[in-house]
Image (cartoon, coloured by chain):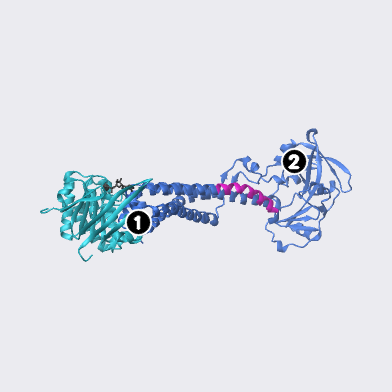
Chain colours: A cyan, B blue
Amino acid sequence: MNDGMIIRTTSLVKIYPLGEQSITALDDVNLDVRTGEFAGLVGPSGSGKTTLLNILGSLDVPTRGSAEVLGERIETLSHRKAADLRNRHIGFIFQTFNLLPVYSVYENVEFPLLLLGFSPAARRKAIQAALEWVHLADRAKSRPSQLSGGQSQRVAIARAIVKKPALVLADEPTANLDAENSHGILRTMEDINRELGTTFLFSTHDGKVIQHLRRTITLVDGRVAKDEVRSGA
Amino acid sequence: MLIPKLAFKNMRGAGLKTWLNAGVLSMAFVVIIWTQGLYQGIDAEASRAMTDAEYGGGQFWMNGYDPYDPLTLQDAHAPVPAPLVSMIDAGRAAAFLVVPATIYPNGRLMSAVLKGVDPDQRVLSLPAAVLKASHTEVPALIGTRMAQSAGLKKGDVVTVRWRDARGTFDAREIEIVEVMSTVVGTIDSGLIWLPLETLREMAALPGQATIVVTAKGTAPGTLPAVPGWTFVGPDVLMKDVKTLVQSKTIGASIMYVILIFLAMLAVFNTQLLSIWRRRKEIGTIMALGMPRGRIVGLFTLEGALTGVLAAAIGAVYGIPLLALTAIRGIGLGASLGDSFGLALSEKLYPVYSVLLVGGTTLLIFLVTTAVSYLPTRRISRLKPTDALRGRFS
Ligand SMILES: Nc1ncnc2c1ncn2[C@@H]1O[C@H](COP(=O)(O)OP(=O)(O)O)[C@@H](O)[C@H]1O
Ligand SMILES: [Mg+2]
């Protein structure tokens, strides 16, 4: 987007059919996110944060309205195009880490690069750099089952940023971590945001995360209730 | 090359699970091939025994002889034609005379067929030589089945009654000089073997015979055409055996199908379970940008590779096992061959043809791949958000 917007939603609505009834998870969401922001969707459980992140990540489609991400209209993308967008430009970080259990740390981080067809040399270099970002260069050979929660989430961060995506979507990344680890990974992501210019969009209701955010978008019942830029953050 | 690489990595990563799945599948391979080899062995063994003891290289039947119609036997004899006589003299054929009779063992009455055999013949593997060594007036050879049904044993003397060429009834005492044990029931049940010349004299049929059996391996092209006699080749003679074996192998075929079906079910189930168990992983790799089609390909290939691994594992323990049974044979116990209604010796040698082993391996491999693919179609209907939430619709 030439106006510096990486995300723009227009009258975004998501309705989940639920038998006879239906749940309106997102209700007329209009949201702009600029390239390089470090922003978070906050709000109570069930307010629609995950739903919005999933749509922005092209994992789901809106019921009505439009979501434009990196110049692509999510609602118009084919499965293959959507996969391609995620593969090239979007990194995901999940609450439950979602590391591939049979792969080593190195192989987990390598996975997106394999999909992108990086050469072995380019892969090695990128993985090394990513693992250094998250201070796990010495655990490359470990299996996910041998890692602590904090370490696992740092591997997930490395996997999300290894391909230098424009956008990282992190859904409640600290929900399974203690305070120290939470601040640790947030600081790492702040560094990456500053140095690489990667846009971060979180979903969280964790005060420790909110402390680090430069912008908080509050969702209530699927609507944007408040949108604050924190000065001095 | 990404998909094979990932499939290989996943299988290696799954460790024991991979080996267990492949191990179970390998048993299906081995058992299927083993049972089929057993039946092919039965077929080969029955054919061999029948050829050796009864069919030789084919038989000349005098026109009018019908082994399936006992009423024709009375007149089933004719002088042996000259071309056959010369074959017999050269040891390339042997004449047999069939005469229906009645015997009176232990005061009972029982019909039997007298069969004349030249004690010196080498064409069939019959212990006919015992008839020559004997000094008894009418020495007779019977098999264990006949001994059993008539209640006769070696050394017994029994009265036989028959009609000679002129239609006159005649009777004589014969002595059982030997009871032979044979796997070929058709040279045993209801039969009494007498020296050919003795029987010819008893029935007043000098120089006559019912059938002339050629030596095993005789090329049908080299045989003379003999008017009044029909040549019945080994294939035709064997047809009965083949039919019998075939009726037995229907059981084997059903078994084959069941085993393959079970293997399919196991693969299908394993695959479905694996997809369900790995649904979150599937959601994750979808989020990482792997298109569904490639995920389907990945899981299918993993299933197919399990088939390959199973074939390899099966080969490791199956080949020595099958080779051992093929070389050493499998003990059947004396009675099984009889209860099977086939000429089977106590040891059976399974036959594993290239077609059987190769065909079965290929078949199971194709089935495994197809069955691995079927459940993965669910992936293509799976929404990434559902997969990530651990839902599987
Ligand atoms: N796949 C789904 N099917 C039906 N309802 C859903 C589904 N996903 C989310 N919801 C509903 O949509 C609303 C918003 O959910 P979600 O986006 O997960 O909120 P949050 O992440 O803020 O907790 C909730 O009421 C939730 O129950
Ligand atoms: Mg949520």
* Circle 1 residue: B6
Q: Secondary structure at mark 2?
A: strand
Image position, residue B61 (x, y; %): 77, 55
Q: Secondary structure at mark 1?
A: helix
Image position, residue B280 (x, y; %): 33, 49
For marks 1 and 2 on the same chain, the one whose residue lies earlier in the sequence: 1
Q: Which mark is residue A212?
A: none
Magenta-colored segment: predominant secondary structure: helix
**Residue contact between numbered discs 1 and 2, judged by CB atoms under 8 Å:** no
Image position, residue A211 (x, y; %): 15, 48
Measure the alpha-carbon separation of dots 1 and 2. Answer: 76 Å
- Categorize mark 1 by other alpha carbons within 10 Å: few (<14), some (14-19), many (20+): some
- Categorize mark 2 by other alpha carbons within 10 Å: few (<14), some (14-19), many (20+): many
Residue type marked 1: Leu
Q: Tell me: residue B106, above or below residue B362.
A: above
* Circle 2 residue: B177
Task: Name the image quarter holding residue B160.
Answer: top right
What's the residue at 89%, 44% (across, down)?
Answer: B168
Q: Which residues are magenta?
A: B237-256
Residue occupying the far bottom of the picture: A2
Left or right? Give the position of B299 relative to A41.
Answer: right
Residue B253 is one of the magenta-drawn residues:
yes
Residue A42 is one of the magenta-drawn residues:
no
What's the residue at 86%, 46% (across, down)?
Answer: B164
Which one is in front, A117 or B40? A117
The N terminus of chain A lies in quadrant? bottom left
Residue occupying the far left of the picture: A232
1 vs 2, front mark: 1
Left or right? Give the position of A17 relative to B35.
Answer: left
Residue type marked 2: Val
Q: Tell me: residue A2, above or below residue B179.
A: below
